[in-house]
Image (tube, helix red, strand yellow):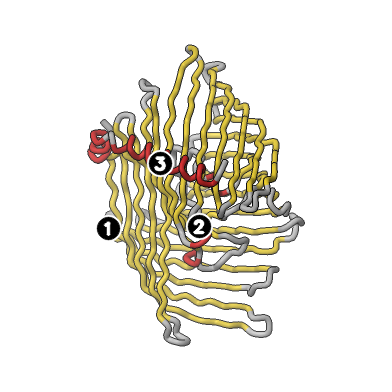
């Protein structure tokens, strides 16, 4: 498909779905009047940041006091077939370098919102979404997250359902997405058309087949990906089980007219165990995709978390495994969250193989009814062909003590540490931040009509 055709398809879809949304003013008014849950907080903080950079034969240090504002808002709104989920957060901070007196400002914002219309009694459904995130276009990590670039993404989609039998559903859908940013982050867009057939096999299980074609454009490179996958899911008494297997084929057209072909066996496996006070999940996923194509893939209906950063990728075959566990069983006043993830990525453009790793630990302990202690650890690492040799990694520690002053008002002392270690042609860094924060929040809970 020509580049101009990809653009016209994506823009036409965005305009069409936006017009559909505008034709439902009553639904929008209902969303305002039907707040299921919405909460947020605003904070005023002061911090002292000390950074050490290893120059090989010497160590460069600098200390910066700062003052800043941060805030976040999230919620769920429901009105009949219409629902809206959102989660946004941002920070603005001004710093002064004590060494030379230079004044600098840092700001960052991340968030996501999703509006969807789904009525079981209607054949038609549609969705709108917005995402703002920090992205990186290389393999390096930074100790200051605000140093990453910011990207906005808009996407929209619609679907129509048919029922060829009492137990079967056939859905045709289309999704379009476009990113807005600076430099290489701009002018990225994609369009995906898909069909999904599912059939209920029993009261708890179902099977089906999913077929899709995606067109994407990124830096004058056009990519077409065709995918087909058989899917089986089963709702168990102690959790759920899902499995899928199929294949994908991609055609990549470069500005000079050269065309390359790629193909891969794809699939996924998900197993979740649920109990009253803990949850464990294991996920394996193998896919053929690029960052531009991901813009038009349908987003999950629930917003669990917003990643700190998203890496921009070319066309890759990725194999990833994620294991997570969350529990409140350790003691009556504490909760624990664990997760580890590993991925192997093979570039279909350069042929290079890379390995990526991630681990997190979150531990919270309720000291008293008004005091809480929290500990968090994050580790990310990159390796090349040799999976055992990590060439770039960063460790992040956070310890915080929170004291409740009044309803929705709290004071906290936070200590952050970041350690950047690299085998690349760059310097190792260490950063230590002591932060005092005063926060005021709000919470509104209602019942949907």
Report the Cα–Cα distance between label 1 and label 3. 46 Å
In the visual, does 72 lie left or right of 312? left
Seen at 48% across and 56% down, the residue is 186
Name the residue rendered at 48%, 80% in the picture: 63
Dividing the image into 4 quarters, which one contains the C terminus?
A: top left
Q: Nearer the viewer, mark 1 or mark 2?
A: 2
For image coordinates 46% across by 56% down, the residue present is 151
Q: Please identify, in this view, whether the residue under mark 1 or under mark 3 is nearer the observer.
A: 3
Callout 2 environment at 10 Å: few (<14), some (14 to 19), or many (20+)?
many
Q: CA distance from mark 1 to mark 2?
A: 43 Å
| Quadrant position of residue 271 | top right
Does 206 appear above or below 448?
above
- Residue 122 position, x and y percent, is 36, 22
Q: Which residue is mark 3?
A: 14
Q: Residue furthest bottom?
A: 100
Q: Which residue is mark 2?
A: 185
Write down the residue under mark 1: 406
Occupied quadrant, residue 236: top right
Q: What SS does tag 3 mark? A: helix
Q: How far across and how far down the image is residue 277, in percent?
A: 49, 39
Query: Is residue 32 shown left or right of residue 288?
Result: left
Assess whether mark 3 and mark 1 are in contact (beta carbons under 8 angstroms): no
Residue 373 falls in image quadrant: bottom left
Task: Say if residue 231 shows up in the picture.
Answer: yes
The answer to whether residue 447 is visible is no
Q: Residues within 10 Å of mark 1 (few under 14, many from 20)?
A: few
**Mark 3 touching mark 2, by CB under 8 A?**
no
């Amino acid at each position: 498909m020509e580049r101009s055709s990809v653009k016209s398809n994506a823009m036409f879809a965005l305009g069409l779905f936006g017009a559909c949304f505008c034709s439902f003013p009553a639904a929008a008014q209902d969303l305002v009047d039907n707040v299921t849950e919405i909460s947020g907080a605003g904070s005023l903080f002061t911090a002292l940041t000390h950074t050490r950079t290893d120059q090989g034969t010497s160590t460069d240090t600098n200390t910066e006091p700062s003052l800043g504002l941060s805030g976040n808002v999230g919620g769920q709104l429901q009105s009949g077939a219409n629902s809206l989920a959102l989660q946004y957060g941002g920070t603005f901070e001004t710093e002064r370098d004590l060494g030379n007196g230079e004044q600098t400002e840092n700001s960052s914002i991340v968030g996501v919102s999703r509006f969807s219309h789904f009525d079981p009694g209607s054949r038609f459904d549609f969705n709108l979404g917005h995402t703002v995130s920090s992205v990186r276009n290389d393999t390096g990590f930074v100790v200051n997250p605000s140093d990453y670039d910011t990207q906005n993404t808009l996407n929209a989609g619609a679907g129509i359902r048919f029922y060829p039998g009492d137990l079967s559903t056939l859905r045709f859908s289309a999704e379009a997405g476009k990113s807005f940013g600076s430099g290489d982050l701009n002018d990225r867009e994609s369009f995906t058309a898909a069909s999904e057939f599912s059939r209920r096999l029993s009261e708890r299980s179902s099977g089906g087949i999913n077929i899709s074609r995606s067109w994407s454009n990124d830096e004058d490179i056009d990519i077409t990906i065709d995918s087909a996958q058989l899917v089986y899911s089963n709702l168990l008494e102690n959790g759920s089980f899902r499995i899928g297997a199929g294949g994908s084929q991609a055609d990549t057209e470069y500005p000079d007219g050269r065309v390359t072909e790629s193909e891969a066996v794809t699939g996924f496996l998900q197993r979740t165990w649920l109990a009253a006070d803990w949850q464990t999940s294991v996920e394996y996923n193998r896919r053929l995709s690029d960052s531009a194509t991901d813009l038009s893939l349908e987003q999950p209906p629930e917003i669990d978390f917003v990643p700190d950063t998203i890496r921009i990728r070319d066309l890759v075959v990725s194999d990833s495994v994620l294991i997570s566990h969350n529990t409140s069983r350790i003691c009556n006043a504490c909760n624990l969250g664990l997760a580890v993830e590993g991925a192997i990525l093979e570039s279909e453009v350069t042929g290079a193989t890379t390995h990526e790793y991630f681990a997190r630990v979150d531990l919270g302990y309720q000291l008293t009814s008004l005091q809480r202690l929290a500990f968090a650890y994050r580790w990310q690492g990159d390796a090349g062909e040799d999976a055992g040799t990590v060439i770039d990694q960063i460790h992040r520690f956070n310890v915080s003590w929170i004291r409740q002053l009044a309803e929705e008002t709290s004071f906290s002392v936070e200590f952050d540490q970041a350690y950047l270690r690299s085998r690349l042609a760059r310097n190792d860094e260490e950063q230590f931040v002591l932060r005092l924060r005063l926060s005021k929040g709000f919470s509104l809970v209602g019942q949907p009509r």
